[in-house]
């Protein structure tokens, strides 16, 4: 089977790390480039984390640095706040120092220019797999409109049909750059959204996490790193395991059957005093509007967790 060319856009991040594991070991995905953005940590840190993980996982794709803040927002202070609590002060569960400093350097191109280069050079359409705030992707759409036909789809982890995780109705990747998310949703590139409604179903239990250690060096590092993530989901949400949001779109690219998709009209709320950043989804398909987005409404926890073990045992 021919591999799908993919650009990954990450804010690495613990679940981004698990997504990288899946992508790097898959026979279905050809990672053409990795671009990084602020989100779970500063872009300097998410880029460094990505480089470290590329060396751990043997990924030789170029890695570029992208946006350090959202279109209209200030840079986040990472010395306090939810991001630090969820992903650790280094974005890798305070275990990043277990990995050597990366030898690999970031690409000379910016994230957006690297995306453009990959698309220009590709004979086939390329999937953009985004598991982070959508700032790089929106900037690319605005800067290179002529290349949008080279994008097969934008598969992004973000949003929520019901509920949120940084506000009652707002998910982090959308909430960190609401204007960028609006540019993406309004673009005519095919879109597949993987919201919390599906991703929250895929958690790795403590027993499963510890079993990763039996698979070797990579599994041992990941098991150590995501321990704090497991604890925070238990404490904040009462979920018995580490929620692997960013693995879901990645798993879908490898095996479509692990996720259930439905077509909906999705719009980003820009004005609501309490709801700005909500991905308003017309789940009843009653209120008009183009069906502009495929939306993951369910995900198969068992199969997706098994995919991580298959990847580790490869
Ligand atoms: C998303 O936000 C980040 O914390 C995770 O890496 C994931 O991409 C979940 O809301
Ligand atoms: Ca992420």
Image (cartoon, rainbow, N blue to C red):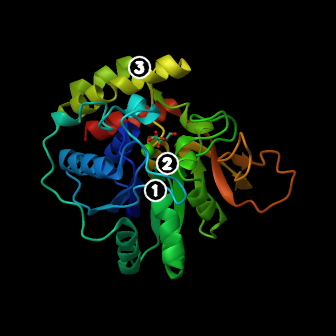
Decide if residue 66 is on the left or right side of residue 221. Answer: right
Callout 3: SS: helix
Residue 79 placed where, x, y %?
A: 36, 35
Q: Which of the image's four quarters has the C terminus?
A: top left
Q: Which of the image's four quarters has the N terminus?
A: bottom left
Report if the CB atoms under discs 3 and 2 are less than 8 Å apart.
Answer: no
Question: Which label's residue is closer to the chain start, 1 or 3?
Answer: 1
Q: What residue does disc 1 label?
A: 129
Q: Nearer the viewer, residue 291 or 9?
A: 9
Callout 1: SS: strand
Q: Residues within 10 Å of mark 3 (few under 14, many from 20)?
A: some
Q: Is residue 262 above or below residue 200?
A: below
**Quadrant in the picture for residue 112:** bottom left
Report if the CB atoms under discs 2 and 1 are less than 8 Å apart.
Answer: yes
Q: What residue does disc 2 label?
A: 249
Mark 1 to mark 3 CA distance (whole Å): 27 Å
């Amino acid at each position: 089977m021919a591999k799908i060319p993919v650009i990954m856009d990450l804010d690495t991040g613990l679940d981004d790390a698990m997504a990288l594991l899946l992508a790097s070991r898959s026979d279905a995905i050809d990672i053409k480039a990795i671009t990084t953005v602020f989100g779970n940590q500063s872009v300097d840190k998410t880029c460094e984390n990505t480089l470290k993980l590329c060396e751990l996982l043997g990924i030789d794709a170029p890695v570029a640095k992208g946006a350090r803040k959202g279109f209209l927002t200030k840079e986040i202070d990472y010395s306090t706040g939810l991001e630090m609590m969820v992903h650790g002060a280094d974005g890798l569960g305070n275990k990043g120092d277990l990995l050597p400093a990366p030898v690999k350097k970031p690409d000379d191109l910016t994230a957006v220019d690297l995306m453009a280069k990959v698309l220009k050079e590709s004979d086939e359409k390329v999937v953009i797999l985004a598991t982070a705030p959508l700032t790089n992707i929106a900037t690319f759409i605005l800067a290179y409109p002529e290349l949008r036909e080279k994008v097969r789809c934008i598969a992004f982890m973000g949003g929520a049909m019901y509920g949120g995780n940084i506000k009652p109705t707002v998910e982090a990747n959308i909430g960190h750059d609401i204007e960028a998310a609006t540019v993406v949703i309004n673009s005519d590139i095919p879109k597949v959204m993987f919201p919390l409604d599906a991703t929250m179903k895929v958690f790795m239990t403590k027993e499963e996490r510890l079993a990763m250690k039996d698979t070797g060096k990579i599994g041992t590092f990941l098991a150590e790193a995501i321990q704090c993530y497991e604890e925070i989901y238990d404490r904040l949400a009462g979920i018995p395991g580490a929620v692997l949001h960013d693995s879901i779109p990645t798993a879908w690219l490898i095996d479509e059957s692990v996720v259930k998709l439905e077509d909906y009209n999705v719009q980003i709320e820009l004005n609501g005093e309490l709801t700005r950043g909500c991905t308003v989804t017309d789940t009843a398909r009653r209120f008009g509007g183009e069906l502009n987005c495929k939306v993951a409404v369910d995900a198969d926890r068992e199969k997706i967790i098994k995919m991580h073990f298959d990847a580790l045992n490869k």
